[in-house]
Amino acid sequence: MSQPLNVLTIATGKKLYINMAANLARSFWLWNADTGINFYLATDQASLLPDDVKQYAKIIAVQPGELGEGFSTKLHLDKLAPEGQTLFIDSDCLVYGNLEPVFKKFAGHAVSVIGGYIASGEWFGDVVAICKKFKVRELPKFNGGIYYLENYDEAKQVYELARQLELEYDEIGFVRLRNRPNDEVIIALAMALTNKTPIPEDGSIMSDPLTCQGKFSTDIIKGETTLHNPPKPSPLHQEWFPFTTVHPLVVHFLGHHSLSHQYKKDVYLLSVIGLGGLSARHKLKAFIGIELPMKLKVGLKNTLRPIYKAVFGTRRIKPSERL
C-alpha cells in the first residue's frame, strides 16, 4: 500500500505570511487538485485564510510562538508532518505543475533536501572550521525553500538534533541571518551528523531569482517557468550553480522577489480562479494593470539609477516587511 503524499507549509505571525501561504495553496490546488496529494497549512491565524483555501487545505492549528520565530519554525517539521511522505514548501513559493514526480525522487529518504555539498569557504560561517569541529567531511548545501521527510523515528532524530544545535548556534560559529539563526545550516549540520543526503540539484524541482539572476518568466496558467543564470562574463553569473537555464516546478520568491511583477501577476490570476473563474478580461488586466507598468517602472529605474547615484549618492535600503 502506498504512503500518503503531503505538502506542508507554515504561516505564523504576520498577516503577510498568511497571504503568501494562501497564494501557495491556490497554486498547489490549481495543478494538484486531482493528484490525491494532501495540502497541510500550519498557522496561528486560520481565521485570516480565504474561504476557498479553507475548502481544501488541512489546517494544523498552532499557538503563537509555539514553533519559535523566523527561520526557527522550520526546525519543527517532524512535529507537524503527517503520516507518509511530506514535502515542506516555504510560503513564499508558488507551484507550477504536478508534484507527484518530486515525491518519487525523494522516496526512501528519511530527511532530505535538494542540493550538493560544501567543504570549504564561507556559508554562514567558516565551513572548514565547523566541519573540523564536528568531525564531518562536508555539509549539504541547499535552499531551505523545500525540505522532505518521512515522519518516522529517523526524521525525529534529525530534527531533535537540529533543535539542540540551534541552542549553540553562535558558539558553533554560525553567522546569523537577519539577526536570527538560519535553519539551512542547522539542518545541514544535523544531516551531516546523521548521514542524511540531499538529492542532486538539477533545477527541475525548485529554483529562485537569487540563484538565477538573469531575466525570468512565469505563467501560472500554463504552468511554465524559465529562470536564467547568465553565463560568464556576466557579473550576474553564479559560479556555484552549474546550469544556465532551468524550468522548475516550484519558484521560490524569496526576499524582495515577492514584490516582482511575476509574483504579483500570478497571485492575481490565482485569486481570480479562487473566486470562481478566469476570463480573457482577467488575463488582460493582469498584463496591462500589473505586468506592463511594473516592467516599465523597473526598466526606467535601471536606466536612471546611475544618474541618481551620481547626483544623490546611494539611497538607504528600506527595511523588509518580513523582519
Image (cartoon, grey):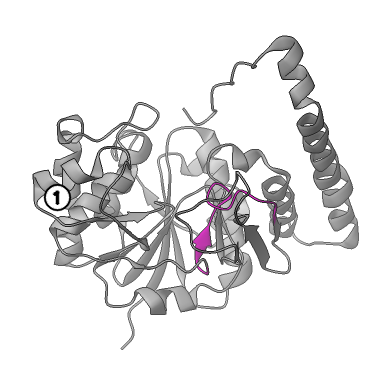
Q: Which residue is mark 1?
A: 161
Residue 279: x, y in percent?
Answer: 86, 62
Give the residue displayed 49% in from the left and 49% down from the top: 91
Compared across the picture, whether 317 is left or right of 42 comes to right
Residue 299: x, y in percent?
Answer: 81, 37
Residue 168: x, y in percent?
Answer: 15, 34
Based on the displayed image, in which of its 4 quarters is residue 231 positioned?
bottom right
Q: What type is the residue that disc 1 sits on?
A: Leu
Question: Relative to 304, does residue 266 appear above or below in the rendering?
Answer: below
49 or 294, nearer to the observer: 294
Query: Residue 310: within the magenta?
Result: no
- Quarter holding the N terminus is bottom left
Query: Residue 215: within the magenta?
Result: yes
267 or 232, nearer to the observer: 232
Give the residue displayed 60% in from the left and 46% down from the top: 236
Question: Relative to 106, does residue 238 appear above or below in the rendering?
Answer: above
Farthest residue in the front direction? 233
Q: Main secondary structure of the magenta part?
A: loop
Q: Secondary structure at mark 1?
A: helix
Compared across the picture, whether 61 is left or right of 158 comes to right
Segment tinted magenta in the rendering = 204-216
| Residue 163, visible in the rendered structure | no
Question: Relative to 6, does residue 61 appear above or below in the rendering?
Answer: above
27 or 321, nearer to the observer: 321
Based on the displayed image, in which of its 4 quarters is residue 290 positioned?
top right
